[in-house]
Amino acid sequence: QVQLVESGGGLVQAGGSLRLSCAASGRTFSSYHTGWFRQAPGKSREFVAAINDGGGNTYYADSVKGRFTISRDNAKNTLYLQMNSLKPEDTAVYYCAADIRPPARLVGGHADYWGQGTQVTVSS
């Protein structure tokens, strides 16, 4: 089992940047593929980005491609999401997630382990 705790959310103006972090504890973090999801008020949760266990392969939703960058530091058991050129429509609760099965499962919106979420609000 792995426990996930997000941090780094907050209020930012449109065009600004934020970096989210997700600290993992429990079983070996480097064995898990990981990703970020978000849920805006009144909407269902959506996939944002994923990265494989070794960090060599990344996957992005079209809506964030070119603006967001996912990365991980297995030595620090931490997952990151660098968010640039933020837009009001990026406002949501952001969740990190982990799964030992292939990254396609994360891209498909599924994961075995979830964090509690961190709020990101982008003002216009």
Image (cartoon, helix red, strand yellow):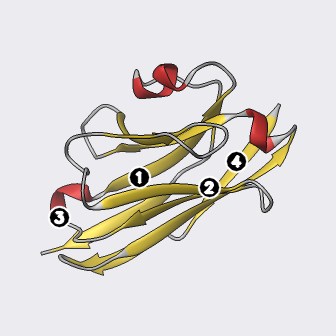
Most foreground residue, 21 or 33:
33
Left or right, 117 with reference to 11: right
How much space separates mark 4 and mark 2, taking CA atoms? 13 Å
Image spot of residue 83 (x, y percent): 36, 66
Q: Which residue is mark 4?
A: 4
What label sits on residue 3 in the rendered view?
A: none
The first of marks 3 and 4 along the sequence is 4
Closer to viewer: mark 4 or mark 2: 2
Q: Quadrant of the C terminus?
A: bottom left
How much space separates mark 2 and mark 1, taking CA atoms? 20 Å
Question: Which of the 4 image quarters holds residue 90?
Answer: bottom left
Local crowd at mark 4 within 10 Å, few (<14), some, or many (≥20)?
many
Image spot of residue 108 (x, y percent): 40, 21
Q: Residue furthest right?
A: 27
How much space separates mark 2 and mark 3, taking CA atoms? 26 Å
Residue type at mark 1 is: Val
Q: Are marks 1 and 4 in contact (CB under 8 Å)?
A: no
Most foreground residue, 90 or 58:
58
Q: Residue at x 58, y 36 (%)?
A: 52
Residue type at mark 4 is: Leu
How much space separates mark 1 and mark 4, taking CA atoms? 15 Å
Q: Residue at x 87, y 37 (%)?
A: 27
The first of marks 3 and 1 along the sequence is 3
Residue type at mark 3 is: Pro
Q: Which residue is mark 1?
A: 93
Closer to viewer: mark 2 or mark 3: 2
Q: Are marks 2 and 1 in contact (CB under 8 Å)?
A: no
Residue type at mark 2 is: Arg
Q: Which residue is mark 3?
A: 88
What label sits on residue 72 in the rendered view?
A: 2
Left or right, 120 with reference to 5: left
Determine the secondary structure under disc 3: helix
